[in-house]
């Protein structure tokens, strides 16, 4: 074989040509002609050119990058109204009425399933929540009080239930109002877990999940940021305590009538056929009533009558008599007069578990599974129904009504009107969880934008506190002052958070943070479950465990971790904004192992474990074996027709993809090789 001929004066320019000429002639036919001319001239000199990749020489026009946060156009694919005959128009109207009635029915079942879900969580963790509140020494620690508020509200799925426990403890002098304020802040965080769970149901479509999860977690980020900013101020100055104390002391308060229940009037007839709870048991456990530990949370008798009678009773010693005037002895027995309370049980409840012998935990788990099943089914059908209804002109009208801003100089007014609308709707449904869970799928399908969902969520926070204030005004005289002061603390805490994180556009950090998390969870959908477990369970439990060890251990562990977290956040921001201000080593995270700055290795590991599990679970299934053999045969056929590209260029692309996984999640909105 002849040796490789030597090339006279090998220069780089002989092979790649003049760079300036290349840049001018890259696109179109002119670039191809120029390239052919260069090759012909070099061939005339008798030079043999080395192989090189054409990737660097072809500048293909890149398609415009789509904004994943832009609201999709819901096109009307059906027949136009003007093209329908009379019969078709009547059928379409009847279909529209039927869809509207079905939507109302699904919304009703959705709200009822949320109510049953709350009852299920109380049955599973209600007594444990009451036991957590019993430790007075831990509750005096504001950080421990904060995480206890988060854990208890997550366990009972109701901030109103945890607030009623706090009011009972304050009125029985087991807890001071000032020590209860951090617990109220934690309850504000815990109540946002419901709509985060609801957002997981839209994980089927990548872009819908991106928007829905961002809309759900915008509530989480606002609550966490408000706590990080306001809890230290409250611990140092006590401004919430002093402000609400002045307001409560300035009014002559009297016990009022029962607070209005708007949505409960509609949902209670159905939910009471499934389960009814005796919530006084949790309050009794929290106030150190030992007799309540053996009681069931499931209400058995719905109609009872309590009678108080004055009876002669025996006591061990004369000192135990109620009064010296009503104390006498008869032989070896000492008698006295005492009020005796007797309860007559008139009629039983009519719910499914009234005559059941199952323990509370078993009933709670059954209801938890059923309520989650109904919740998921209703949400999926609501999303599909809204997708079929909100098309064409109807969708454009709704989008313009909700998302359009006012003309300058009143642009700022639209957000505050949305906040007012959110507060009003939450007041009507009397639950911020219900309202935010209802708008989450609307954001997912693209009816409401992320920027507009933020003031709606803030309004929901205000609306739920006004409901609590009305409920406090209806409290009995013994607890009226404390319940009203705690409700006002909750109200002014949310107002302070809005002042910090809404009026100026650059202060709206929750929007940017939720979009970042939305992009991440759209690429790695399993990360949404990881976020849910860490933020609402593992992190509060970790801090609570440290608080049990005392202040020195809590500060010694948490302060370095907090400083490290802040440093990482600051470096990340500077890497994006001003990388040249950082040392060369800190301009990227490549000096760390890949698993410390990328989710790709974790995703590959999770994929491998799922594939291993699926393979071995189906090992004894003949159908699975046949499918596996067919897939293997297809792979062998495809190997003969594969096109192999430049391996060096592919390796470079792979490295680039590993370094910027977040960018890939924005650009690639199709299928990928993530675990879920």
Image (tube, rainbow, N blue to C red):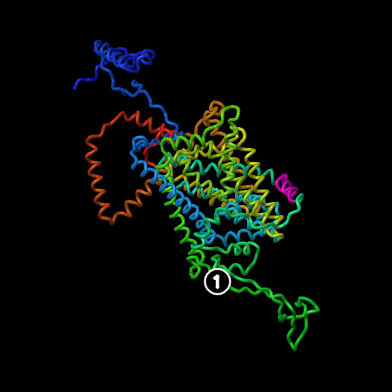
Q: Nearer the viewer, residue 9 or 561?
A: 561
Q: Can residue 219 be seen in this view?
A: yes
Res 477 → quadrant: bottom right
Q: Can residue 173 be seen in this view?
A: no
* Residue furthest bottom as drawn: 331
What residue is drawn where x is 32% and y is 16%? 31
Q: Using residue 576 as the reference point, say whether residue 203 is left or right of it.
A: left
Q: What range of the chain is rendered magenta?
A: 236-248
Q: Using residue 600 as the reference point, say whether residue 550 is left or right of it.
A: right
The total of numbered circles placed on residues is 1
**Is residue 237 in the magenta section?**
yes
Q: Nearer the viewer, residue 44 or 608?
A: 608
Q: Residues within 10 Å of mark 1 (few under 14, many from 20)?
A: few
Residue 492 coordinates in the image, percent (x, y): 67, 45
Residue 362 coordinates in the image, percent (x, y): 48, 64
Under circle 1, the secondary element is strand
Quadrant location of the N terminus?
Answer: top left
Find disc 1 in the rendering and name its residue. 347
Q: Using residue 558 as the reference point, say whether residue 649 is left or right of it.
A: left
Would you place residue 258 above or below residue 92 in this image? below
Residue 189 coordinates in the image, percent (x, y): 58, 48
What residue is drawn where x is 60% and y is 27%? 409
**Is residue 616 in the magenta section?**
no
* Residue furthest right as drawn: 325
What residue is drawn where x is 25% and y is 45%? 631
Would you place residue 219 above or below residue 647 in this image? below
Res 148 → quadrant: bottom right
* Residue furthest left as drawn: 1
* Residue furthest front as drawn: 86
By secondary structure, the bulk of the magenta-drawn segment is best described as helix
Quadrant location of the C terminus?
Answer: top left
């Amino acid at each position: 074989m002849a040796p490789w001929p030597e090339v006279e004066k090998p220069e780089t320019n002989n092979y790649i040509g003049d760079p300036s000429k290349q840049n001018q002639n890259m696109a179109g036919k002119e670039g191809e002609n120029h390239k052919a001319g260069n090759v012909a001239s070099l061939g005339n000199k008798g030079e043999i050119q080395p192989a090189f990749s054409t990737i660097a020489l072809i500048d293909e026009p890149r398609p415009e990058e789509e904004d994943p946060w832009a609201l999709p156009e819901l096109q009307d694919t059906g027949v136009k109204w003007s093209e329908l005959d009379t019969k078709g128009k009547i059928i379409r109207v009847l279909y529209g009425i039927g869809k509207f009635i079905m939507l109302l029915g699904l919304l009703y079942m959705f709200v009822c399933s949320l109510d049953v879900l709350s009852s299920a969580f109380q049955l599973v963790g209600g007594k444990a929540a009451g036991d957590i509140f019993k430790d007075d020494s831990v509750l005096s620690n504001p950080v421990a009080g904060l995480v206890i508020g988060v854990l208890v509200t997550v366990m009972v799925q109701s901030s109103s239930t945890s607030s009623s426990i706090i009011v009972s403890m304050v009125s029985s002098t087991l807890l001071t109002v000032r020590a209860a304020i951090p617990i109220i802040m934690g309850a504000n965080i815990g109540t946002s877990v419901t709509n985060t769970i609801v957002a997981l149901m839209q994980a089927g479509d990548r872009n819908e999940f991106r928007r829905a999860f961002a809309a759900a977690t915008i509530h989480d980020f606002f609550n966490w940021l408000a706590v990080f900013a306001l809890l230290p101020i409250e611990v140092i100055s006590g401004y919430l305590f002093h402000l609400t104390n002045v307001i409560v002391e300035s009014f002559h308060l009297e016990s009022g009538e029962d607070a209005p229940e708007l949505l409960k009037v509609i949902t209670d007839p159905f939910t009471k056929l499934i389960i009814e709870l005796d919530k006084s048991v949790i309050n009794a456990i929290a106030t150190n009533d030992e007799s309540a530990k053996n009681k069931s949370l499931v209400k058995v008798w719905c109609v009872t009558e309590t009678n108080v009678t004055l009876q002669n009773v025996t006591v061990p010693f004369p000192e135990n008599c109620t009064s010296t005037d009503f104390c006498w002895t008869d032989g070896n027995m000492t008698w006295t007069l005492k009020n005796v309370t007797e309860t007559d049980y008139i009629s039983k409840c009519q719910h499914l578990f009234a005559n059941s012998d199952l323990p509370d935990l078993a009933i709670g788990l059954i209801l938890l599974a059923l309520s989650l099943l109904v919740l998921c089914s209703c949400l999926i059908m609501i999303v599909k129904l809204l997708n079929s209804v909100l098309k064409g002109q109807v969708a454009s009208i709704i989008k313009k009504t909700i998302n359009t801003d006012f003309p300058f100089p009143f642009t700022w007014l639209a957000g505050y009107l949305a906040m007012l609308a959110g507060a009003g709707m939450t007041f009507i449904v009397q639950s911020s969880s219900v309202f935010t869970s209802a708008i989450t799928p609307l954001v997912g399908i693209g009816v409401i934008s992320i920027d507009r969902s933020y003031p709606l969520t803030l309004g929901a926070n205000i609306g739920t506190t006004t409901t609590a204030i009305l409920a406090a005004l209806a409290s009995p005289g013994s607890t009226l002052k404390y319940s009203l002061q705690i409700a006002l603390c909750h109200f002014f805490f949310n107002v302070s958070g809005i002042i910090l994180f809404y009026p100026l556009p650059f202060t709206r950090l929750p929007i940017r943070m939720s979009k970042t998390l939305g992009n991440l969870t759209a690429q790695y959908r399993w990360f949404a479950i990881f976020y849910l477990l860490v933020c609402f369970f593992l992190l509060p439990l970790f801090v609570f465990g440290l608080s049990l060890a005392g202040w020195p251990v809590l500060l010694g562990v948490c302060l370095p971790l907090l400083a490290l977290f802040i440093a990482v956040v600051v470096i990340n921001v500077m890497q994006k904004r001003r990388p040249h201000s950082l040392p060369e080593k800190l301009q990227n995270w490549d000096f760390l192992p890949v698993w410390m700055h990328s989710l790709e290795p974790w995703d590959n590991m999770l994929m491998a474990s799922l594939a291993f599990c699926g393979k071995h679970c189906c090992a004894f299934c003949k159908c699975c074996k046949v499918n596996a053999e067919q897939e293997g045969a297809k792979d062998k056929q495809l190997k003969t027709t594969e096109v192999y590209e430049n391996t060096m260029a592919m390796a470079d692309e792979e490295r680039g993809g590993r370094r910027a996984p977040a960018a890939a999640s924005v650009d690639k909105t199709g299928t990928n090789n993530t675990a879920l």
